[in-house]
Amino acid sequence: MLRSILCSFVAVMALVGSDAHARELKRVGWVEEIAVSEVGAVVKAKLDTGAKTSSIDANIIDIRKSGEKTAQATGDTVVFAVTLDTGKIKTFERSVNRYVRIKKKGGGYIRRPVITMEFCIAGRTVKEEVNLANREGFIYPVLVGRNMMQHADLVIDASARLLSRPTCQDQVQ
């Protein structure tokens, strides 16, 4: 019990930082249902304070140069597909914000494109960066990292699961 309280306190302190205009923190479990707005699906996601950037299961079809490199984008466009639980496949095309280098198990690195997507988590709409990854070997198709938790003002209760519903009033469908 003390360990759970201490973990929650550390998570709160990490998320709050010096942000004086933050909303009230919302308590969530380490697994939550979230709505992936553009995909039009609700999926279970793992919330992981060890991950800086969120990640979504996607099949990258193509990455191509589409413009000039700027401070906000690489000048690349990625075409990727997301497979829903129903088996339906949705294809998207997005500008690549940046690339992230991820350590692979067994050594080495993999380079993943990072895009912006909109999610509804714990009743809060968050438009945030996610990297595109093959999460086929993982239980959850979405990993919510610190970037999304901080912008949604979430705090994780490591002893709980499924504490909230992904219902957002301002959610764009």
Image (cartoon, grey):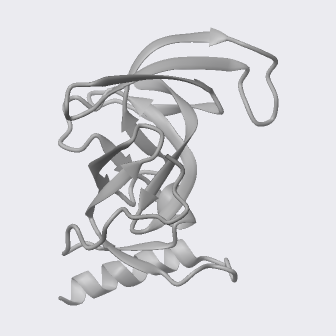
Residue 71 placed where, x, y %? 81, 35
Count of numbered badges drawn on the protein: 0
Residue at 50% from the left image edge and 41% from the top image edge: 130
Q: Is residue 127 visible?
A: yes
Residue 121 placed where, x, y %? 41, 61
Classify 54 as above or below 136.
below
- Give the quadrant of residue 98: top right
Quadrant assignment for the N terminus: bottom left
Q: Is residue 47 visible?
A: no
Residue at 22% from the left image edge and 90% from the top image edge: 2
Nearer the observer, 79 or 91: 91
Residue at 46% from the left image edge and 46% from the top image edge: 37
- Give the quadrant of residue 50: bottom left
Nearer the observer, 107 or 155: 155
Q: Is residue 104 left or right of residue 154?
A: left
Residue 48 placed where, x, y %? 35, 57
Q: Is residue 56 left or right of residue 13?
A: left
Residue 169 placed where, x, y %? 50, 66
Q: Is residue 8 left or right of residue 129?
A: left
Residue at 79% from the left image edge and 22% from the top image edge: 69
